Amino acid sequence: MKKIFYFVIILIGLSACTQQSKTNDYLLLTGESEHWKLSDYEILLTPNGETIGNGKLIMKNANEYFTDSFSFRTYVVVDGTSNRVHTGSVSGKTDISKQTTGKIEKDGHNANALSLKNIDNIYIEIEWTDQETKGNKRERIDLYNKSKDKNRLIN
């Protein structure tokens, strides 16, 4: 009887070892638009949550640029639907020429958790008040496209 018990325990242990483990997905993203350059933007997706951000937004050809408003929004496109995953903003007279994105962390197990297998595109929109016209300007930086960037993945 003891032999059968130990045999069952060993089989359970071996079957647990052969189950596929979930992987972590990591992207280090960069990109540019007409007025902006984004570097070091990270996306880490794990079975236990997400960490998004830590990037640097630099306004091209500007040592300083004072304006009344600035914001960015990062979107992940899954099945044709854009989902906002990270935002940041400043208001009041501020130099926006060099901005950091900060980061967000989302913990927990979620049946609808992001996975690079599901993501088609990732992009960031930057909006600010133009010094000269006082109107809003908006630019988009494409950061990831599944069909073009498959080789950028690090598991």
Image (tube, grey):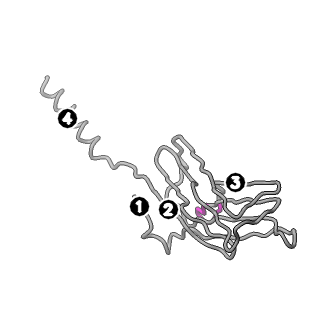
Amino acid type at circle 1 is: Ile
Residue identifier under label 3: 88
* Stretch of the chain drawn in magenta: 76-82
User: How far, Cα to Cα, is label 4 from label 1?
Assistant: 34 Å
Amino acid type at circle 2 is: Leu
User: How far, Cα to Cα, is label 3 from label 2?
Assistant: 19 Å
Magenta stretch containing residue 120, yes or no? no
Residue at left offset 80%, top offset 59%: 69
Q: Earlier in the sequence, mark 3 or mark 2?
A: 2
Residue identifier under label 4: 10
Q: Is residue 94 left or right of residue 36?
A: right
User: How far, Cα to Cα, is label 4 from label 2?
Assistant: 41 Å
- Image-quadrant location for residue 12: top left
Above or below, 39 relative to 15: below
Amino acid type at circle 4 is: Ile
Residue at left offset 43%, top offset 64%: 153
Residue identifier under label 1: 154
Residue at left offset 60%, top offset 48%: 104
Q: Earlier in the sequence, mark 4 or mark 1?
A: 4
Q: Residue furthest front?
A: 63
- The reply to whether callout 2 and callout 1 are in contact (CB within 8 Å) is yes
Badge 3, how many Cα within 10 Å: few under 14, some, many 20+?
some
Q: Residue 65's spot in the image, x, y percent?
A: 76, 66
Q: Earlier in the sequence, mark 4 or mark 3?
A: 4
Under circle 2, the secondary element is: strand
